[in-house]
Image: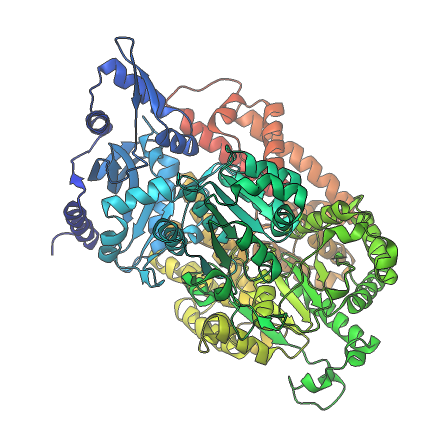
């Protein structure tokens, strides 16, 4: 065979796309692209353009970034004709998406910072809208993703920048094929397989192309199922299960008057799905209103915020029932969000009911969020009786079946009884398989076994209140949490929640945590929130977590259990002192504001442990929360909902959701998994036992030894192919070590690799990363650039500048015979820590030049601070003088970066130059200066 396998893949795909209806067109250059665009827009708009008219269109198309261009694509352009008349130019037909012009081309060459040649491009009406990057079989799919990331930097924005109109990327090695939206901030985790409606993934390129790249389907995805996220100014595309759910609802409304529900597991993006369904339904002229119903005021606010992020003009929340009624009567508002409580009041109280009476026969679609929670009993009946032409759709991650139904008035209400049939399912096993949520790692700690000879996990017989609320029991659990919290949360990189059985128990735990903090036994920031309602204790543990009534805080104090109210006031006072806040529980709104602030601080990792009874166990999403401590009985949907607070995808370091249970939940967990997936799903949902990962680590270690049997042998690897093998082998070691490290039992004694050996190999691994970084800045191409080094797996949060200063003080005090050894240990530690490597030379300089002159080890920190300030000032001076930069402007660029996390644009960088470069030099000089500024920040400011 003379052609390369990648070329065969490309040729086969081109032939297939032609047969699907994409017209082949030969486009090699920018001029070819523009000529074709002109002819295709003329054809689509049934007109012709003069040279001047087409230039006006090009100027219009060239404005803005990817997000702006996505809006331009969807809007019509008012073209001022040469004869003075106006024409409305359409770039894509969104209403009849099949009625567009479809073409396919390949190997378009575009010159930017570098010359790039793109594999396969689908054009709609002459604009490039789908870019397909192919790699030969056996190559990691991530390589194709990385190549597109390079195109983003090198050439997509060059010349006419028409490649910024790409809406969807497709990457494939023939065997695996994924798609994602054009969002330069995307990580590889935001790439998706397409699937059948049954959630069976379609991975082979030929099968994927037949379904996903068929002209009508890809046009529908672009026009209907890409969401422009307004607040972040980026593009999002729906995943297949979201697409099928929305399509099912639309079909149900179009063809029937029946209800239905969507079963999509917790954490799978139900808000985006429900938004898109709501948005499309509002375009149906037969529907008067689409009402999105939530069951808590804070969810109302949260959903409004999220809906506005997708479309800032889409929605208004309803602050009170009067506003809800006004929105019902306002014909300009087709989409509304409200709480079930306000909706119930609107159709129950005479003064509101009389006003919306005229809408009762209008077609109104209700979409219920988390329909397993509140839509039972009288409220549901009132809504369906009042609105005679209604259609109800529910979203839930954990439906109510007969087995887990809550009994109300001697009836057991199930989700199907209230919402009719399930229209689409995407259960937890599907989400874990697709890496949309994480597995759970469950460890059971038998408190009683520490004192008595009781078989592990068989403690349900000791389920007596006086035992579980005893001081000894609470002390044991608290001490165990304090001993293991850093391990579970990767040294507070993540946060935790602790759920307990009642407010009385919560009070005991909180007071003990606070006492131990005051005694200096820990420095964890523990916060709590609970209601005063008597039903706050979940005695049945059936998961029917009671609704939160924020109005209760305004009732007379006599209605409360006074100790609880006093305690909450005291705990909020502690919270205010800790964070400099001014919260209270004086009324419902104040209590809600306190809850919102806690939500924000958990997400921002300012709270280490949030102590609750029921609150926050449903409907609360925080990617930074990875651990749940459980000292209460949970089962069925209550258990899955609570566990699911921990399993949101974040990064490589967050490899699973940790559950540390102090009750015997093993049987309840098995039953819940069986109910919401299937009885054989345990291996999919739960992380394997500790011993399995030990074995897996040792096997990975043997493979590493075959490649590099000693640390020094890494230096002798012959070429980049061997270095790539080493990098992949050690990356696997890091991944397994990351999971092992979260087990309370973990010790390096259990595995073949010793702790110092791991640190030494880490240094060599980081050396390879530094080599690639250097090659990239020199514009050298390295095959090592195709691997994601996942440096967050190496970073140890306890090893920072403060920790190094402590070691330097110990070095100062060390006997002379130990100083060389300790000095080497410090340098080795700095070398093996990703964030400190850039500081290695400076720390060595301080050790050799400054440390010997310090008389008292108490002065090490102050002397290091003075040394660092001097070196920082000197480095800034060198940077600005060597590059002829205005120092004040550079400092402003750095300050803005530290505040916003956004590096300055090319224009902003060049504005800091004393003298502007030529047009040909702008990109190379800007890139060089940007790299130097980023290196300066990494060395002198990050982690100091």
Q: Would you say residue 940 is visible in this rendering?
A: no
Location of residue 425 in the rendering, given as x and y in whole percent from the top left corner: 42, 63
The colour scheme is: rainbow
In x, y percent, where is residue 69? 39, 30
Q: How many marks?
A: 0
Residue nearer the viewer, 329 or 445 = 329
In the figure, residue 529 lies in which quadrant?
bottom right
Q: Quadrant of residue 924?
A: top left
Q: How far from the left and from the top, in percent, is residue 237? A: 40, 46
On screen, residue 307 above or below 2: above
**Front residue (pair 188, 165):** 165
**Taking 572 as reference, is 498 above or below it?**
below
Residue at left 54%, top 34%?
330
Residue sticking out furthest to the left? 1
Q: Residue 815: which quarter of the image?
A: bottom right
What residue appears at the point 52 percent right and 41 percent down from the top-left corner? 359
Percent x, y for residue 336? 54, 41
Q: Is residue 404 left or right of residue 43?
A: right
Q: Is 204 placed left or right of 613 in the picture?
A: left
**Residue at the top extreme, as displayed:** 83
Task: Say which of 882 and 549 sits in front.
Answer: 549
Q: Residue at the location (83% across, 64% down)?
A: 511
User: Looking at the picture, does residue 257 appear above or below residue 425?
Assistant: above
Between 337 and 322, the one nearer to me in the picture: 322
In the image, what residue occupies the spot 57% across and 27% down?
Answer: 880
Is residue 928 left or right of 299 when viewed as pictured?
left
Q: Which image quadrant: the N terminus?
A: bottom left
Q: Is residue 573 above or below residue 403?
A: above
Q: Could you tell me which quadrant the C terminus lies in? A: top right
Residue 355 visible in the current orientation: yes
């Amino acid at each position: 065979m003379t052609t390369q396998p990648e070329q065969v893949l490309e040729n086969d795909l081109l032939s297939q796309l032609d047969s699907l209806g994409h017209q082949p067109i030969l486009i090699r250059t920018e001029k070819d692209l523009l000529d074709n665009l002109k002819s295709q827009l003329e054809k689509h708009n049934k007109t012709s353009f003069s040279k001047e008219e087409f230039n006006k269109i090009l100027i219009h198309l060239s404005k803005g970034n990817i997000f702006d261009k996505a809006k331009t694509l969807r809007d019509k352009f008012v073209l001022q004709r040469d004869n003075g008349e106006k024409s409305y130019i359409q770039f894509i037909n969104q209403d009849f998406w099949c009625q567009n012009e479809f073409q396919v081309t390949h190997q378009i060459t575009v010159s930017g910072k570098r010359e790039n040649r793109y594999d396969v491009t689908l054009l709609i009406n002459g604009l490039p809208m789908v870019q397909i990057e192919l790699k030969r079989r056996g190559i990691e799919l991530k390589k194709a993703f990385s190549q597109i990331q390079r195109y983003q930097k090198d050439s997509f924005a060059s010349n006419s920048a028409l490649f910024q109109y790409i809406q969807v990327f497709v990457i494939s090695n023939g065997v695996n094929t994924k798609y994602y939206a054009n969002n330069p901030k995307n990580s590889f985790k935001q790439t998706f397989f397409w699937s059948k409606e049954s959630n069976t993934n379609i991975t082979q390129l030929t099968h994927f192309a037949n379904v996903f790249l068929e002209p009508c389907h890809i046009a529908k995805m672009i026009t209907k199922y890409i969401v422009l996220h307004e607040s972040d100014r980026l593009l999002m595309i729906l995943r297949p299960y979201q697409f099928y759910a929305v399509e099912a609802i639309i079909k149900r409304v179009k063809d029937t008057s029946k209800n239905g529900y969507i079963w999509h597991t917790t954490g799978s993006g139900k808000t985006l799905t429900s938004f898109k369904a709501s948005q499309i339904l509002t375009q149906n002229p037969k529907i008067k209103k689409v009402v999105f119903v939530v069951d808590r005021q804070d969810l109302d606010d949260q959903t409004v915020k999220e809906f506005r992020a997708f479309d800032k003009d889409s929605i208004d929340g309803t602050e009170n029932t009067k506003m809800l009624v006004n929105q019902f009567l306002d014909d300009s508002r087709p989409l509304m969000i409200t709480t079930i409580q306000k909706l119930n009041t609107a159709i129950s109280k005479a003064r509101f009911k009389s006003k919306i009476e005229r809408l009762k026969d209008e077609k109104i679609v209700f979409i219920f969020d988390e329909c397993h929670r509140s839509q039972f009993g009288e409220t549901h009946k009132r809504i369906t009786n009042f609105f005679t032409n209604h259609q109800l759709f529910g979203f839930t991650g954990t439906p109510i079946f007969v087995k887990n139904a809550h009994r109300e008035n001697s009836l057991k209400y199930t989700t199907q009884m209230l919402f009719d049939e399930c229209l689409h399912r995407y259960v937890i096993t599907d989400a874990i398989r697709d890496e949309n949520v994480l597995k759970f790692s469950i460890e059971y700690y038998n408190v009683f076994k520490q004192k008595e000879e009781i078989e592990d996990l068989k403690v349900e017989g000791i389920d007596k209140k006086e035992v579980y609320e005893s001081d000894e029991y609470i002390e044991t659990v608290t001490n165990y949490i304090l001993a293991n919290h850093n391990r579970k949360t990767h040294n507070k990189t993540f946060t935790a929640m602790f759920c307990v059985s009642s407010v009385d128990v919560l009070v005991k735990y909180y007071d003990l945590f606070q006492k131990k903090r005051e005694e200096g036994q820990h420095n964890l920031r523990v916060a709590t929130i609970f209601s005063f309602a008597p039903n706050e204790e979940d005695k049945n543990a059936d998961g029917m977590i009671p609704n939160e009534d924020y109005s209760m805080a305004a009732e007379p104090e006599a209605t409360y259990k006074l100790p609880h109210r006093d305690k909450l006031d005291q705990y909020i006072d502690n919270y205010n002192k800790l964070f400099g806040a001014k919260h209270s529980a004086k009324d419902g709104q104040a209590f809600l504001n306190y809850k919102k602030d806690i939500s924000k601080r958990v997400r921002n990792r300012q709270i280490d442990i949030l102590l609750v009874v029921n609150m926050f166990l449903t409907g609360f999403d925080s990617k930074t929360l990875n651990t749940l401590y459980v000292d209460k009985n949970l089962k069925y949907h209550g258990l899955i909902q609570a566990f699911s607070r921990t399993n949101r995808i974040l990064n490589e370091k967050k490899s699973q959701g940790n559950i540390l249970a102090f009750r015997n939940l093993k049987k309840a967990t098995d039953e819940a998994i069986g109910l919401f997936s299937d009885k054989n799903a345990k291996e999919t949902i739960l992380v394997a036992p500790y011993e399995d990962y030990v074995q897996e680590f040792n096997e990975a270690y043997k493979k590493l030894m075959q490649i590099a049997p000693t640390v020094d042998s890494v230096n002798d690897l012959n070429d980049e192919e061997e270095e790539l093998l080493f990098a992949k082998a050690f990356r696997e070691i890091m991944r397994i070590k990351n999971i092992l490290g979260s087990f309370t039992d973990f010790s390096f004694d259990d595995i073949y690799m010793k702790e110092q050996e791991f640190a030494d190999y880490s240094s060599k691994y980081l050396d390879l990363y530094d080599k690639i970084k250097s090659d990239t800045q020199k514009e050298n191409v390295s095959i090592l650039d195709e691997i994601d080094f996942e440096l967050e797996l190496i970073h140890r949060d306890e090893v920072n500048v403060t920790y190094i200063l402590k070691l330097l003080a110990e070095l100062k005090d060390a006997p002379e015979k130990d100083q060389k050894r300790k000095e080497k240990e410090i340098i080795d530690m700095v070398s093996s820590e990703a964030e400190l490597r850039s500081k290695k030379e400076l720390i060595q300089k301080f050790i050799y030049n400054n440390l010997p002159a310090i008389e008292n080890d108490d002065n090490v920190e102050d002397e290091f601070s003075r040394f660092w300030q001097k070196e920082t000032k000197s480095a800034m001076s060198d940077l600005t003088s060597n590059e002829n930069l205005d120092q004040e402007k550079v400092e402003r660029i750095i300050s803005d970066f530290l505040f916003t996390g956004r590096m300055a644009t090319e224009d902003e960088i060049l504005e800091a130059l004393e003298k502007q470069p030529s047009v040909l030099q702008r990109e190379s000089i800007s890139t060089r200066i940007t790299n130097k500024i980023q290196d300066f920040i990494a060395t002198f400011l990050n982690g100091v």
